[in-house]
């Protein structure tokens, strides 16, 4: 919630800098919120646990509603246990496209504004994962290792109380640094960089770091065991390539045409 609030303030300031009226800005939060939530949920269910959520009516209901259904028809409210950042990114991109069509705004302008604020929200998300003992690192003897006490209740984790890399904290620190870099670039250059630059920089920075930090994380689901690259890494590669395209190639054809 803190991450979303900070992102809201930053994007609002960018709209103000561009002299875009409040009525245009107001619906943006709802498009972003529901785009991220729906995309993150569907991303987890489709990428990480398709055999649970896509093979039965019970699974489809649990994918859509934040509940767990027990034999006999009883159910329990659990919240959405399983959200994937790659799916959230896809959902956000689609939601912003819908917003831009509705408000008649240039799609890349909005993507760039959201991209400047995204790293601080990503930082807060990983801090929340750290608090919840989620997405933990592999066992290490590093002096800054964490013991995640809550893992003692997870039968799928081997040696649950062994010291581990605080991979969530590594990501949180990296994303905060990326946020500072993005803000410095935005402060000094603002609209002098081509459309799509901030969007591309955000994708390439976040998902490149995500690719490498996965090497010291525990696999999230069983089918990743033995894979040379896990699902998080495989899903990160397209985002890295898209990011590099928008940084270096997106405006090349337009510039050649003008010359």
Image (cartoon, rainbow, N blue to C red):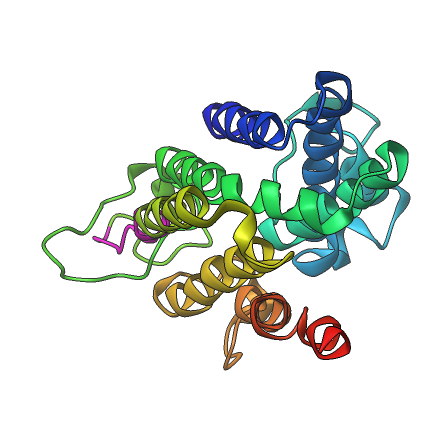
Question: Residue at position x 9%, y 54% from top?
Answer: 143
Is-magenta flag for residue 47? Answer: no
Where's residue 35, x and y in %? 74, 38
Q: Quadrant of residue 104?
A: top right
Q: Is residue 90 above or below residue 118?
A: below
Q: Is residue 35 left or right of residue 179?
A: right
- The front one of 162 and 229 is 229
Where's residue 105, x and y in %? 80, 39
Question: Residue at position x 35%, y 44% from top?
Answer: 180
Where's the C terminus, which quadrant? Answer: bottom right
- The front one of 137 and 232 is 232
- Residue, far left: 143
- The front one of 104 and 176 is 104
Where's residue 160, x and y in %? 32, 50
Where's residue 167, x and y in %? 33, 53
Whether residue 244 is visible to the viewer of this picture, yes or no, is yes
Q: Is residue 216 left or right of residue 89?
A: left
Q: Is residue 153 above or below residue 215?
A: above
- Residue, far front: 259
Whether residue 67 is visible to the viewer of this picture, yes or no, is no
- The front one of 138 and 100 is 100
- Region of the chain picked out in magenta, as a range: 162-171
Q: Is residue 235 above or below residue 11?
A: below
Is-magenta flag for residue 164? Answer: yes
Q: Is residue 146 left or right of residue 201?
A: left
Q: Quadrant of residue 34?
A: top right
């Amino acid at each position: 919630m803190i991450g979303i609030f900070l992102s809201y303030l930053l994007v609002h300031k960018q709209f103000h800098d561009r002299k875009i009226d409040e009525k245009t800005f107001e619906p943006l939060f709802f498009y972003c919120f529901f785009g991220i939530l729906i995309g993150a949920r569907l991303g987890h269910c489709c990428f990480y646990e398709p055999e649970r959520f896509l093979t039965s009516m019970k699974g489809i209901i649990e994918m859509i509603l934040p509940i767990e259904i027990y034999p006999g028809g009883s159910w329990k409210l659990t919240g959405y246990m399983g959200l994937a950042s790659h799916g959230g990114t896809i959902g956000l991109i689609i939601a912003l496209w819908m917003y831009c069509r509705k408000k008649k705004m240039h799609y890349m302008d909005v993507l760039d504004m959201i991209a400047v604020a995204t790293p601080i929200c990503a930082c807060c998300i990983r801090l929340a994962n750290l608090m919840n003992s989620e997405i933990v690192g592999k066992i290490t003897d590093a002096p800054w290792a964490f013991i995640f006490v809550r893992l003692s209740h997870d039968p799928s984790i081997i040696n649950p109380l062994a010291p581990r890399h605080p991979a969530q904290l590594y990501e949180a620190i990296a994303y905060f640094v990326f946020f500072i870099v993005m803000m410095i670039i935005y402060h000094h250059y603002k609209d002098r960089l081509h459309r799509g630059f901030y969007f591309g920089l955000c994708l390439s920075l976040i998902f490149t770091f995500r690719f490498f930090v996965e090497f010291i994380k525990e696999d999230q689901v069983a089918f990743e065991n033995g894979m040379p690259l896990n699902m998080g890494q495989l899903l990160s590669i397209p985002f890295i390539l898209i990011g590099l395209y928008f940084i270096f190639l997106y405006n090349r054809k337009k510039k050649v045409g003008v010359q």
